[in-house]
Image (cartoon, rainbow, N blue to C red):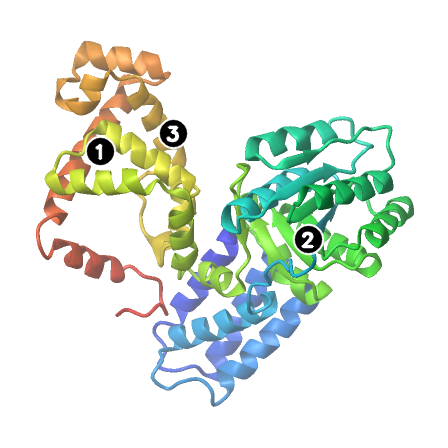
Amino acid sequence: MFKQLSERLNQTVKKLSGQAALSEDNIKDSLREVRMALLEADVALPVVKEFIEHVREQALGEAVQKSLSPGQALIKIVNDELTQMMGEHNDALNLSCQPPAVILMLGLQGSGKTTTTAKLARKLMHEQNKKVMLASLDVYRPAAIEQLKTLSGQIDAQWFPSEGSEKPLAIAKAAIDAAKRQGQDVVILDTAGRLHVDDEMMHELQAVHNAAEPIESLLVVDSMTGQDAVNVAKSFSELIPVTGIILTKTDGDSRGGAALSIRKVTSKPIKFMGIGEKVDALEAFHPDRVASRILGMGDVLTLIEDAESKLDKTKAEKAAKKMQKGKFDLSDFRDQIQQMNKLGGLQGIMSKLPGAGQMPMGGMDDTMFTKYEAIINSMTPQERRYPDIIKGSRKRRIAAGSGNEVPEVNRLLKQFTQMQKMMKKFSKKGNMQKMMRQMQGQLPPGFPQG
């Protein structure tokens, strides 16, 4: 997400690196670049105008610290304004009511609403230890009820059965009553989506909302639709008391215009964002962290939180000890690939590391690691433990078994050997600090260098 915007903003900052201080001339040129970058990211024009004016005032005001370079000064101002534009802080779910807390899920068809319903339920169950019931009010889409039922089984949430012949309002009332009797903490009602906002749909939603009295009414919008997502959010919030927004498909959205516009246009907070298809791919939306990602400064806090909640600590500790002893083998490497995938893959991790977007990747990507995992799975336990025995006929067998070519097997073995050498080097005292100093020199302009 925000890839194009991030690249353009970093180019703008680089142009300021040779300047002695921020001035009216270089600010004018820089803001023209920033304005184009925001418009290309599909940010709403009124939002862009207000943003640019605020940055101009800050950049030419007395608030700019003299100790900062022009690049650092502009990054700080833009970072603060981006954060303010998106809401300054995360608006957590409000569940402060007599159980069960009712959450109403709203949105157009195709926005990812049903999948997001299951993701939210899982998040509440795993992170807040809540007992959650799911119910589908979508009696219009034939597979909708069955889809949510299947997802409910995958995450072990309580399922409230419903039929296509029933009325949404009746299902909502019955589900809430059942949740009360069963002592559920939360009941999430997945309403029907439509291809467009229409009167019939809104009347139905208003009736359900009035009867269910939800403490949260969450609007799910597809971030990849850009300004259409903003318009949909505006239309819904004018007719239904929306309490928050969930942006879906942000992992496929390289522009990010919806995230940057929606709070300003609707005054509704973005509470979560979907970052993938898996049931655990839902993140709390922190404006300050998202602004930091946009400017290439990473999001280490979210990465740490993800690691703590998703990684197998026992495996990680075991792998660390084997690395220190120089006994790290291909089975361990495969485990690391699987652990990495739990954090959103290489791309997901790199997007959260300071300056990582500016670093050369040497051809590494998530597709390559998927191939590597398949290749390792085609090996025998002995081959994984002793890669040196993998020669001609073994390579051909492994390549055929994994659906790859022999050169790809060679590439894996070569990179694994290089990695082993690097681990031995860094296990020696002082070498890790040296590597960190080298990495620091590659951080983006304006990022603190120590």
Which callout, 2 or 3, points at the residue further toward the start of the chain? 2
Which numbered marker is on residue 99?
2
Mark 2 neighbour class, 10 Å CA radius: few under 14, some 14 to 19, many 20 or more: some
Question: Mark 1 against mark 2, which lies toward the viewer?
Answer: 2
* Residue furthest to the bottom: 62
Mark 3 surroundings: few (<14), some (14-19) or many (≥20) residues within 10 A: some
On the question of residue 389 being in view, the answer is yes
Please tell me which of labels 1 and 2 falls first in the chain: 2
| Amino acid of disc 1 | Gln
**Relative to 347, is 148 above or below?**
above
Pinpoint residue 168: horizontal percent, then vertical percent: 84, 39
Q: Give residue 271's position: percent from left, percent from top.
A: 61, 57
Cα gap from disc 1 to disc 3, whole angstroms: 15 Å
Residue of label 1: 415
| Position in image of residue 270 (x %, y %) | 62, 58
Helix, strand or loop under label 2: loop
Label 3 belongs to which residue? 370
Q: Say which amino acid is labelled 3.
A: Thr
Hey, which quadrant is residue 237 in on the image?
Answer: bottom right
- Residue type indicated by callout 2: Pro
- Find numbered disc 1 in the image and state the secondary structure of the residue it sits on: helix
Q: Is residue 80 above or below residue 118?
A: below
5 vs 249: above or below? below
* Cβ atoms under marks 1 and 3 closer than 8 Å: no
Q: Nearer the viewer, mark 2 or mark 3?
A: 2
Q: Viewed as shown, does residue 236 lie left or right of 428?
A: right
